[in-house]
Image: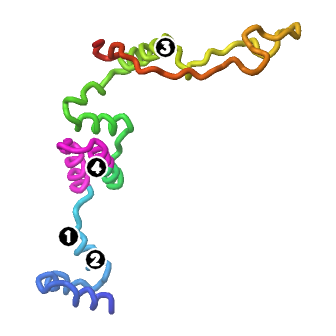
């Protein structure tokens, strides 16, 4: 009974007239909740709408991505189910048209990676190591491998030079 009295004392006069005839505190709370609480679908629509209508403005891409990730998190808290690919697509779609070079199909991505790999192989990249089934220390007969010097290992890191070649994407 005291909870009911506290509720009636704390609400506005027009609300008190509507809930005064209710005896149970649970009924009072459900009535107030029905009057003021947003429905779950309305809240979800608002969050998804904000997510889909957000576009990058002049500013930092990092800040925009964090803002989009916040919208995605809010949508998931409310109950929207978004797959990882959908999240990434929504962020990419919200970027400016100058970022459209990031939108590749899987086949295009594979070709880009292959051309990058060929570039690194041609440059003799230090990070590209070839494996061999023959150890470089000793051969089967106990003789030293010709590739290895007596003083230490023959592997020396190479320094990458800046390439002045063509762009992988646009071939310029």
Cβ–Cβ under 8 Å for marks 3 and 2: no
The residue identified by callout 4 is: 67
Residue shown at the point (27%, 73%) measured from the top left? 30
Q: Name the mark nearer the viewer: 2 or 4.
A: 4
Colour mode? rainbow
Can residue 1 be seen in this snapshot? no
Reply above or below: 15 against 106: below
Q: CA distance from mark 3 to mark 1?
A: 67 Å
Residue 9 left/right relative to 80? left
Residue underneath mark 2: 29
Image quadrant containing the N terminus: bottom left
Nearer mark to the viewer, of 3 and 1 = 3
Q: Which residues are magenta?
A: 41-69
Numbered-mark total: 4
Q: Residues within 10 Å of mark 1 (few under 14, many from 20)?
A: few
Residue under numbered circle 3:
123
- 79 and 17: which is toward the camera: 79
Q: Nearer the viewer, residue 55 or 49?
A: 55
Relative horizontal placement of residue 69, taking residue 110 as reference (left or right): left
Residues at badges 1 and 2 in contact (C-beta under 8 Å)?
no
Determine which residue is flagged by label 1: 36
Residue 25 drawn at (x, y percent): 31, 82
Badges 1 and 4: C-beta atoms under 8 Å apart?
A: no
């Amino acid at each position: 009974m005291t909870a009911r009295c506290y509720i009636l004392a704390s609400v506005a006069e027009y609300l008190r007239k509507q809930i005064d005839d209710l005896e149970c505190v649970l009924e009072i709370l459900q009535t107030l909740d029905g009057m003021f609480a947003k429905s779950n679908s309305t809240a979800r629509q608002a969050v998804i709408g904000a997510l889909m209508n957000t576009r990058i403005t002049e500013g930092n891409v990092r800040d925009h991505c964090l803002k989009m990730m916040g919208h995605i998190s809010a949508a998931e808290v409310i109950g929207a189910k978004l797959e990882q690919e959908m999240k990434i697509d929504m962020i990419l779609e919200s970027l400016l048209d100058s970022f459209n070079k990031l939108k590749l199909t899987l086949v295009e991505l594979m070709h880009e990676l292959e051309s990058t790999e060929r570039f690194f192989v041609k440059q003799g990249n230090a990070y590209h190591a070839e494996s061999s089934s023959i150890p470089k220390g000793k051969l089967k007969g106990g003789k030293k491998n010709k590739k290895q010097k007596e003083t230490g290992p023959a592997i020396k890191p190479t320094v990458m030079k800046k390439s002045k070649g063509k762009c992988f994407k646009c071939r310029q």
